[in-house]
Image (spheres, rainbow, N blue to C red):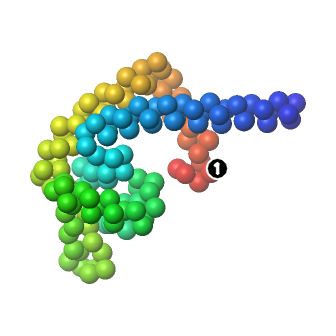
Amino acid sequence: MENEAISQSLKLFIVLSRAYKAINEHVNKGIQASGLNPTEFAVLELLYHKGDQPMQQIGGKILLASGSITYVVDKLEQKGLLKRIACPKDRRVTYAQITDDGKNFIEGIFPEHAESIHKLMSSLTVDEKSEAIELLKKLGLPAGKF
């Protein structure tokens, strides 16, 4: 019985990993077609939907090591899609802020991105998606990811 439970856990891990890999690769191709890499897209999308963000907190919100954020922000700043803003209350804090060009850019590509993800998830009903969300949260909670 214990061996069967372990076997099922391993199978679930493999199926979940393969599903994530396949979906992620498909989504990343669409992102890269826009001229951004997935990390640049994630930062820009975060700023678009959540507003200005302290540079020190961006990594945690998009699951990226903080050391890489400066590089990504530099690239997006060079493209004119975001800018750095000094915090007037605390000189140690710098915010990343999406520019008007950045807003226009993300508004131009995000609807297609969202539709692509929706199509990838369309094999599940609305109820199945809700159930999957709850089950995945249940899996992630003990690992400290939610």
Residue at (52%, 35%) from the top-left corner? 20
The residue that disc 1 covers is 142
Number of callouts: 1
The residue shown at (43%, 25%) is 121
Q: Is residue 97 left or right of residue 135?
A: left
Q: Position of residue 68 (x, y in %)?
A: 40, 62
Looking at the rendered structure, the secondary structure element under dot 1 is helix
Q: Is 15 positioned to the left or the right of 64 in the image?
A: right
Q: Nearer the viewer, residue 127 or 26?
A: 26
As drawn, 75 above or below 85:
above
Q: Quadrant of residue 13?
A: top right
Residue 136 in the image, given as x and y percentages of width and height = 56, 37
The outermost residue toward the bottom is 91
Residue 40: percent from the left, percent from the top? Answer: 31, 51
Q: Position of residue 76 (x, y in %)?
A: 24, 56
Circle 1 residues within 10 Å: few <14, some 14–19, many ≥20: few
Does residue 63 appear in this view? yes
The residue under the point 20% across, 69% down is 85
Q: Give the residue type at disc 1.
A: Pro
Image quarter where the N terminus lies is top right
Side (left or right) of 2 relative to 84: right
Q: Quadrant of residue 34?
A: top left
Q: Does 122 sit above or below residue 50? A: above
> Do we see residue 130 in this rendering?
no
Residue 88 or 80: which is nearer the viewer? 80
Question: Would you say 75 lies left or right of 140 here?
Answer: left
Q: Residue, x 46% and y 61% (percent of image)?
A: 65
